[in-house]
Image: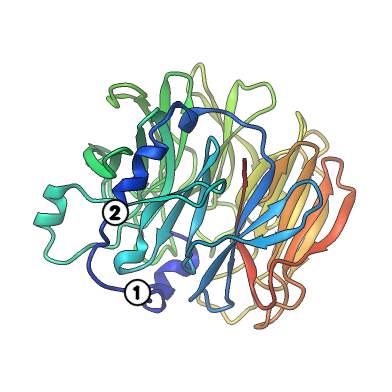
Amino acid sequence: MTRRSLALAALLCAGCGADPTPPTQSCAHFATAALTATMAPARLVVTGVSPRYDAGRLFSVSLEDFSVRDLPIEATGDTVARALGPFVALLHRAIGDQDNLTLYDPADGRVCQVALLTDAERTAAPTRPLINAHDVVALDARTLLVARYNLDALAVVDVASARVTRTVDLTPFVGTAPHAYPDALRRVGDEVWVTLQRDNDPLRANPTQPGLVVRLDATTLAVRAAVALTHPNPYGPLVPTTDGRALLVSTFGSYNTLGDGAVERIEIATGAVSDVVDERAVNGNIDAVAVLDATHLALRVSAERQGTSALDDLRVLRFDTETRTAQTLLRAGTWGAAAPVVVGERVVIADPGEGYARTNAGLRVFGRDGTELRARVSIAPSLLPYDVQPAR
């Protein structure tokens, strides 16, 4: 869960109630080989949220001219998106019936909503748990795998019936943490990799247990291997290197401690783990990474310290892994959730704006070389970009 979500869960209760009835008449539309297709992005799907993170709207931003339009579908203050072929998967993370997976077709507006519990889990729970889905990947033409952050099992979704048909148990990997806390999913050849935060400090002030990457057979979902990371709290996507030989992930450890996190590299062939850049090199907590080229990374660096009255301080850096030098692309006095996104030759960075009103919030566009191409693309008045994802 994002840093804001735990504190703001009580604010995200609009529409609380019974589980919705999935619109199954539209779900068969999404059960197609297109789910697993790799398509060149034509737009960005952006969640814009209020400064209190208590309301959200979805927008489409053209990659041709960066024009912005509303998408006619609901969002919460904690909704994130993922592209699945020509479709968009929306992970709504709010209490009640806004805690679900929604498939959306931008071409014709059709939707399919899935409650992310099995029938047995629904029956066993005294009250409906907050599932808090963090990621989703397509396994085949009708099957999705969903990371449920608040539950110690991944959900396997049959798209055509809009049901969770089985789960993948993660309890063997909890260690000393209360839960496994699955965060990111990525298809890697004939496997699916999932990062586990395994945070063993409920207050997130002093985690000591390293994160884990569990490797699953993409067909059977049996565990093939588990790779221990160097630091606690892997956060954000598994990002491939330019040569495709490794994946990068940011581990921020504790936001109170400088030096307990890094960008970590995992070799796909061997599972070997090494640090690419540690927090001391950038004097802050690295909580997002994007690959620009073979020697340059875009890093989101947060200097927030929990339990202090200091303002959040956010920087996005273009970091040279050979010279160990950095160019500052963005600096803001308020924290922002969206990671840098690389689309073609452009790097899109979410600017959270300044102050409570989030003045000047929007998107900024750079070239891979750090040259600014667009100073600001406004999403909507008083809304800051919370999640930015390329989509078809």
Residue closer to the observer: 103 or 80: 103
Q: What's the residue type where badge 2 is placed?
A: Pro
In the rendered view, does 244 fall on the left or right side of 89?
A: right
The residue labelled by disc 1 is 15
Name which residue lies at 44% across and 46% down. Answer: 135
Q: Which residue shows up at 79% across the image and 58% down it?
A: 364
Q: Which residue is mark 2?
A: 22
Q: Position of residue 303 (x, y in %)?
A: 64, 65
* Helix, strand or loop status at disc 2: loop
Kindly report which numbered mark, 1 or 2, lies closer to the viewer in this rendering. Answer: 2
Q: Residue at x 47, y 65 (%)?
A: 74
> How many labels were placed on the picture?
2
Up-down relation of residue 320 to residue 313 (above or below): above
Q: Is residue 78 above or below residue 138?
A: below
Res 1 quadrant in image = bottom left
Q: Which secondary structure lies at badge 1?
A: loop
The label shown at residue 64 is none
Give the CA separation, mark 1 to mark 2: 16 Å
